[in-house]
Amino acid sequence: MQNSIAAGRRLAIRVVCAQLGVTVLVAAGFAFADLRSGLAALCGGSVVAVATSVLALRMFAAGPSSAGMVFARMIVGNMLKWGVIAIGLYLTMVKAGLPGLPVMCGVIAALVPQLLGLQEGSSIGLMGEQGLCDLYAPALSLRGLTVDESDAERAVIAGLTSLYGARS
C-alpha cells in the first residue's frame, strides 16, 4: 500500500531532516558574515522544521481513520503549522531582535524541501476552477509530475450526494 500511515511518517521524518539540513547550511553561510546572522537563519529554519513536525504529529500520531477525520486532521494540522511559524517568527524577530533577512532566508530555505519532495513521475491531482488548473498543469508537467485534473463542481456534488445518502 503506497499511502500507508507508516509511509507518511517516514516521509515526514525525511522532510523534517531535510529542512534541518538545509537550515544548517544556510545558517553556516550567514555565520561566516556574522554569528548573529547565522543564529537568525538557524532560528528561522528551525521554526519551519518544528512547525512541520507539529503538522506531522497531528496527521500521523493516530491510527487509521475515516476520510473526514483525516481531512479534519490535515486542516487543523496546517492551521497549527502556520500558527507555530507566525509565533516563531514573532519571537525570533521581535522579541529576540534577530535580523529579519537571515531569518526569512532560513524560513524560505527550510520550505524548499517540501517542494522538491515530489518525485518525478508522481501523480498530483488538481481540482478547481478550470482557468487556474490550466495555469498549474503545465508547470507541474515541466517538473515531471503526472497531472490528474478533476472537475471541482462534480466532485462537490458527488461528495454531498454521498453524505446525504449516508445520513438516510
Image (cartoon, rainbow, N blue to C red):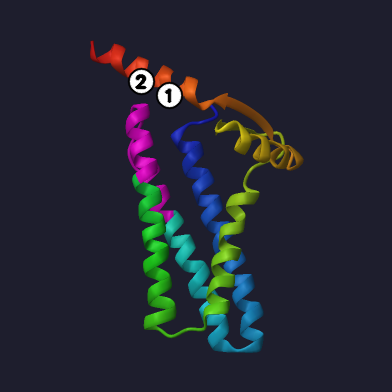
Residue 121 drawn at (x, y percent) = 71, 34
Q: Is residue 64 found inside the magenta-colored segment of the image?
A: yes
Mark 1: which amino acid?
Val
Dominant secondary structure (helix, strand or loop) of the stretch shown in magenta: helix
Camera-side residue of 42 and 111: 111
Please name the residue that numbered disc 2 is placed on: 160
Camera-side residue of 127 and 94: 127
Q: Name which residue lies at 42% across and 59% down.
A: 51
Task: Tell me the CA gap for discs 1 and 2.
Answer: 6 Å
Camera-side residue of 121 and 156: 156
Label 2, secondary structure: give it. helix
Q: Are marks 1 and 2 in contact (CB under 8 Å)?
A: yes
- Which stretch did the figure color magenta? 53-75
Q: Which mark is residue 156?
A: 1
- For residue 109, which quarter of the picture? bottom right
Label 1, secondary structure: give it. helix
Q: Name which residue lies at 44% across and 35% down.
A: 5
Left or right placement of residue 122 versus residue 4 in this view:
right
- For residue 41, which quarter of the picture? bottom right
Residue 110 drawn at (x, y percent) = 56, 62
Q: Name which residue lies at 34% across and 46% down.
A: 76
Q: Which mark is residue 132?
A: none
Camera-side residue of 26 and 127: 127
* Label 2: how many Cα within 10 Å (few below 14, some 14–19, many 20+): few
Left or right placement of residue 143 versus residue 167 in this view:
right
Q: Name which residue lies at 49% across and 20% down.
A: 154
Mark 2: which amino acid?
Leu
Residue 98 drawn at (x, y percent) = 47, 84
Q: Does residue 42 lie above or below 11 as drawn? A: below
Q: Is residue 93 found inside the magenta-colored segment of the image?
A: no
Q: Quadrant of the C terminus?
A: top left
Left or right placement of residue 129 versus residue 92 in this view:
right
